[in-house]
Image (cartoon, helix red, strand yellow):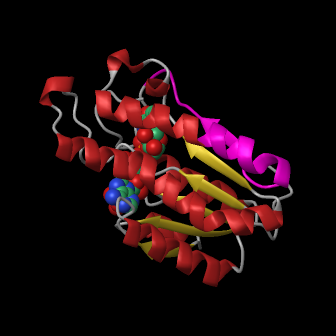
Amino acid sequence: MHLNLTAKTAVVTGASRGIGLATVRTLTAEGVRVVGAARTITPELKETGAYTVSADLSTAEGVATLMDSALTELGGIDLLVNNVGAGDDVEPIGFLDTDDTQWTRILDLNLLSAVRAARAALPSLIERRGSIINVSSINSRLPAAGPVAYSAAKAALAALGKSLAEEFGPRGGAREHRLSRSGPHFPVGGPRGIR
Ligand SMILES: NC(=O)c1ccc[n+]([C@@H]2O[C@H](COP(=O)([O-])OP(=O)(O)OC[C@H]3O[C@@H](n4cnc5c(N)ncnc54)[C@H](OP(=O)(O)O)[C@@H]3O)[C@@H](O)[C@H]2O)c1
């Protein structure tokens, strides 16, 4: 592929495996300078040549560590890929079995990580007419098959993306691109039955 992305910069969350790793591989192959983050820096992520940051992105401190490092390393951000999601706390359980702790953890990782990363990246994205990609899920629109907190978090992520596009799109920053997988479960270590 030749996407004319040479000399662009990107931040990819949840980059150590799965969709995030595939995204980093594609971007680096296109000549994009990438900062990729996850808690574990895998050999596969290192091999891409991306600059890596180890951080727990379910916390405000973790996202701040990532975005500070990315802005220092890259000098500015053209693309933010909010890929991190699902996570250790998503279980195929019903509403009455999902307590406040699980709701909070799932919202922290699937929604607030994107909120915090977007807040930190937006000044640079506006200046460079950049983009945000939020990796969503079919569960955001068809929640029946999935864990309630995960589906609600992905629906809120969709609303966030629309709000950012409305507020910042006219200023040249934060076009919203939302990717949702559907069809067969992607065999890359994602949680059970979650799309
Ligand atoms: N797979 C599917 O079929 C599917 C379908 C629809 C939507 N999605 C969405 O696509 C995205 C990626 O899914 P995937 O299946 O590729 O995921 P995955 O294979 O489970 O990979 C998740 C990535 O996020 C990182 N991560 C998890 N918790 C983290 C935390 N607290 N802090 C920092 N990094 C963390 C993981 O690394 P560490 O564990 O080392 O931190 C890993 O790099 C998610 O938003 C998911 O909801 C996936």
Q: Is residue 4 visible?
A: yes
Q: Is residue 101 above or below residue 145?
A: below
- Asked where in the image residue 126 lies, by quadrant, the reply is bottom right
Q: Which residues are magenta?
A: 161-184
Q: Position of residue 42 (x, y in %)?
A: 40, 67
Give the residue at x 35% y 15%: 144
Q: Is residue 17 visible?
A: no
Q: Is residue 144 above or below residue 159?
A: above
Q: Position of residue 188 (x, y in %)?
A: 40, 42
Q: Position of residue 24 (x, y in %)?
A: 59, 59
- Asked where in the image residue 161 lies, by quadrant, the reply is top right
Question: Residue 181 vs residue 89: left or right?
Answer: right
Tell whether position 120 is magenta.
Answer: no
Outermost residue to the bottom: 72
In the picture, the quarter occupied by the C terminus is: top left
Tell whether position 171 is magenta.
Answer: yes
Question: Residue 7 vs residue 40: left or right?
Answer: right
Q: 137 and 47: which one is in front?
A: 137
Question: Residue 79 vs residue 13: left or right?
Answer: right
Give the residue at x 58% y 62%: 119
Give the residue at x 36% y 42%: 86
Outermost residue to the front: 167
Q: Is residue 141 above or below residue 90?
A: above
Q: 188 and 170: which one is in front?
A: 170
